[in-house]
C-alpha cells in the first residue's frame, strides 16, 4: 500500500526556481523523490544537492563531470525522457529549456514549466507536440498557476484573463529618471525573490509580455482576452473573468514555493507549515491600475511579437536576453533595452508561420536559427548605442 | 433537438431577490421557464408577473385568491413539490421559506436558496433531509455563491472561509453616534439593492452572522474555519483558503443577478449582456479589515448562537426579526437591536440538540415552537426598553 511517490527530474536545480522546488521536495519526502538534477554552472551547489537528495542522474553544463557516488551523468534531453521520471521540472533559464522540454513531451511526461522562453520561442510547436504525445504542461509561474487554479473545475474557456504585474521598482519614475536607472537599482525588486534576468524583465514588464504569450498558448486564449493590470502588492497572482461576468482571483503570500507545490501536488493540495500564509487580521489594501503604455515599451513589443507569431517571439526573447545582459554589465542604459529589442525585431523578424509541410508555426530549426541570428544582430546594434 | 428548459417555482417572487430572479429568466426565455409564482402580500405585482410569465400555479399569502386566467392556486408547500418543477427558488423572507424548502427537499428538487432563515433556523434538519432525499441546495446569496464558485473543482474541504461584509453605513460611527441612528439612516445602504430587513441586518452585521451559520451548514465547515472580514467596496464576495495556503476570491459587480444566474445556469455559465461588468481600466482599490467585535455585537451573538446549536439560532432569527421590525417602526433604537436579541436568547435559548429518537438536532416542531415563543418573549422585553 502507500501512496505513489512522484519521481522528479529538476532541470535548473541550482537557480531560484530549482532551489525552491527542492524546498518543496524536502517538505514531502514520502510523496516526491528527486531522481535527476541538472544545473548550469554551479557545480558546488549541484554536488551539495546531489548529496542531499541522492538522485541517480546528474547533468552539469560544460565539460566538467566530477565523480559523484552512485550517479550517472547524462544530457538534459536524456534525463527528461527517462522511464524512471514521472514529472520534469523545467526551471532552466533562457533558451536552455526548449530541447529538454520537447524531449519530455515526446516521452509523454508531465512537464512543470517555469522557463518562460520555452513557450515564448516555440509555443505553437510545443503545444502541438504536447497534444500529439499526450503530455501535460503545468505552469509553475505564479500568474499562470493562478489562471490554472481559477479555471479549475470550470467548463468552457475564460472570457478574459487579467495578468497581474507588480510593475517593478520603476513604475512611478519619470522618463528622465528612468534613463538614469542602474542595474543595482533594478535588482532591488520589491516583492519576489528572483534571479537578475527575471528581475530586470519584471521592471521593464517584458516579463509580463512574455507571460501573455505563454498564457496565449497554455490556455488557448485569443489576444483580445489577455489584459495586464498593475498590482504592486503582488498578492493577487492573476484573475479570470468568465462569460457571465463573474471573476475568480487566486491569491497568496508572494512565495514561489506555493505555485511550485501546487503543480507538484496537483490534483491534490498539501498542507505545508513552512509556507507563509496571508494575514487577514491586519488591514489590507489591494490596488489595481492599467499600465501606462508609453512607460512600458517592452510590454507593447512583446504583445506585438506575440500577435505577429512566426519567429518574432523567438527574436524578441533573444534580443531581450542580450539587452538585459548588456544592461546588467553597464554597457547600455535601462531605456536602451526596448530600443535594442525593437531594432532587432525590425531587422530579424519573421517568417510567416506557415511551413512547407503545411503545418502551422515555425519549425524548431527556424526557431533556433532566429534565436542565434538575432543575438548576433542585437550585439551589432548594441555596439552603435552602447554607453 | 434543443436544450432542456429548467422549470422554476419562484417563491417570494415580488421581493427583491424574486424580482431579480425573474430578470434573469427574462434574459433566457429558451432555458428557463417559470411554472409557479408565490408572493406574500403584493397582489398587484404578482398579477403583473403572472401576466408576463404565464405560470400554471400561483400562491398569495392570506385569503385573497383573485381570478387569474389559466392559473391554479395552491400552497407554497404544494408548489415546491410539483412534478412539473425542476428547481425551487426560495426567495421568501424570514421563517416563510422553511416549510416550502422542506417540501421541495422531500421531493428531491434542486433548491436555490436565498432565504437566510431556512438554514439559520433549521440547518441541521434541512441538510440531513437533503442528504436523505438526494436534493441539492444551491446558494443564491452573493457570499455563499462566491464560496461555492471558489470550491468548484477543488478536492477536499476549505481550510478557511473569509466571508466579506460591506460593514454597512455605520461601520465608522462612534458608540454615541450609533445610538442616534434612525431607520432612514439605516436604509441608505451603500452598495446593494435589498429589502429593509436585510439592509438593517447588514448594518448590524447580523446578516453576516447568519451567513456564517448558513456557511457552517452548506459547506460543512467547523466554526474555526469561518472568518468575517470587512470589505466596504463589496466587489470581492468572499474568499476560500485551501490547505496549501492558496486562496481564491470570487469577484464581480455588486449585482444580485450574477449569483442568482450562476445558480440557475449551473453547471453552465451564460453570457448575459444585461449584467454589469467590473471595469479594470480605472484604478481600483480593494480594502479588507477585521470587524471590531465591540462595534458589531449582533455578529458575536449570531456566532455564539450558531456554536450553541439546538434551537438557539431559531431564537436568534426570531428575536432579530422582531427587533428590526421595532427599529424600523421607530420603537427601539439601533443599539437596542442587539440588546433585545441577547436578552431574548438568555430567556428562550435552548435544547441540547439531541432528540429522543437519538438523531441530532432539534425537530421541526421544536424549531417552530422556539420561533413562536421567542417572538412573544422579544416583544415583552421590548416593552421594557421601547423609546
Image (cartoon, coloured by chain):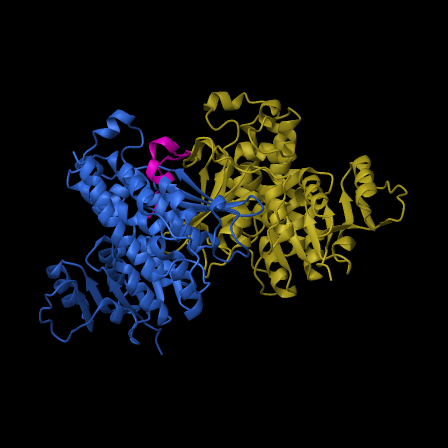
Chain colours: A blue, B yellow
Report the front residue among B136 and B236: B236
The C terminus of chain A is located in which quarter? Answer: top left
Q: Which residues are magenta?
A: A276-300
Image x and y of residue B42, in percent: 78, 36
Residue B45, compared with residue A20, is above or below; it is: above
Report the label total: 0
**Residue A284 within the segment the image draws in magenta:** yes
Image x and y of residue B169, in percent: 52, 27
Q: Locate residue A166: give its quadrant.
A: top left
Q: State the residue lying farthest toward the front.
A: A356
Image x and y of residue B255, in percent: 59, 38
Image x and y of residue B284, in percent: 44, 32
**Measuring 64% from the left and 57% from the top, which residue is drawn there?**
B363
Q: Can see residue A289?
A: yes
Q: State the residue lying farthest toward the bottom.
A: A1
Residue B274, compared with residue A83, is above or below; it is: above
Report the front residue among A176 and B255: A176
The N terminus of chain A is located in which quarter? Answer: bottom left
Q: Is residue A291 left or right of residue B10?
A: left
**Measuring 10% from the left and 65% from the top, which residue is drawn there?**
A64
**Residue A330 within the segment the image draws in magenta:** no
Report the front residue among A291 and A367: A367
Q: Can see residue A194?
A: no
Q: Is residue B28 left or right of residue A10?
A: right
Report the front residue among A227 and B367: A227
Amino acid at each position: 500500500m502507500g501512496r505513489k511517490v512522484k519521481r522528479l527530474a529538476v532541470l535548473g536545480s541550482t537557480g531560484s526556481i530549482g532551489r525552491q522546488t527542492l524546498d518543496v521536495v524536502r517538505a514531502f519526502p514520502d510523496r516526491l523523490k528527486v531522481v535527476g538534477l541538472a544545473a548550469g554552472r554551479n557545480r558546488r551547489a549541484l554536488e551539495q544537492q546531489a548529496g542531499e537528495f541522492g538522485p541517480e542522474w546528474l547533468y552539469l553544463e560544460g565539460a566538467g563531470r566530477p565523480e559523484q557516488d552512485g550517479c550517472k551523468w547524462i544530457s538534459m534531453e536524456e534525463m527528461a525522457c527517462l522511464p524512471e521520471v514521472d514529472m520534469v521540472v523545467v526551471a532552466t533559464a533562457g533558451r536552455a529549456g526548449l530541447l529538454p522540454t520537447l524531449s519530455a513531451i515526446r516521452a509523454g511526461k508531465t512537464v512543470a514549466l517555469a522557463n518562460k522562453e520555452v513557450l515564448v520561442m516555440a509555443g505553437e510547436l510545443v503545444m502541438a507536440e504536447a497534444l500529439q504525445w499526450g503530455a501535460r504542461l503545468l505552469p509553475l509561474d505564479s500568474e499562470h498557476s493562478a489562471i490554472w487554479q481559477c479555471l479549475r473545475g470550470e467548463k468552457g474557456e475564460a472570457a478574459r484573463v487579467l495578468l497581474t504585474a507588480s510593475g517593478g521598482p520603476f513604475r512611478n519614475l519619470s522618463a528622465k529618471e528612468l534613463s538614469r536607472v542602474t542595474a543595482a537599482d533594478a535588482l532591488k525588486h520589491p516583492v519576489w525573490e528572483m534571479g537578475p534576468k527575471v528581475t530586470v524583465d519584471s521592471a521593464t514588464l517584458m516579463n509580463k509580455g512574455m507571460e501573455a504569450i505563454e498564457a496565449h498558448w497554455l490556455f488557448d486564449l485569443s489576444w483580445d482576452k489577455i489584459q495586464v493590470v498593475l498590482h504592486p502588492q503582488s498578492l493577487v497572482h492573476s484573475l479570470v473573468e468568465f462569460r457571465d461576468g463573474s471573476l475568480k482571483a487566486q491569491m497568496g503570500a508572494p512565495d514561489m514555493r506555493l505555485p511550485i507545490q501546487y503543480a507538484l501536488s496537483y490534483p491534490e493540495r498539501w498542507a505545508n507549515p513552512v509556507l507563509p500564509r496571508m494575514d487577514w487580521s491586519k488591514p489590507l489594501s489591494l490596488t489595481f491600475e492599467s499600465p501606462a503604455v508609453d512607460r512600458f515599451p517592452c510590454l507593447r513589443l512583446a504583445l506585438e511579437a506575440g500577435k505577429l507569431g512566426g519567429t518574432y517571439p523567438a527574436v524578441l526573447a533573444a534580443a531581450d536576453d542580450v539587452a538585459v545582459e548588456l544592461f546588467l554589465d553597464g554597457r547600455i542604459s535601462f531605456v536602451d533595452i526596448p530600443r535594442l529589442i525593437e531594432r532587432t525585431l525590425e531587422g530579424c523578424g519573421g517568417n510567416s508561420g506557415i511551413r512547407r509541410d503545411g503545418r502551422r508555426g515555425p519549425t524548431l530549426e527556424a526557431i533556433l536559427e532566429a534565436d542565434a541570428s538575432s543575438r548576433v544582430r542585437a550585439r551589432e546594434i548594441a555596439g552603435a548605442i552602447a554607453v
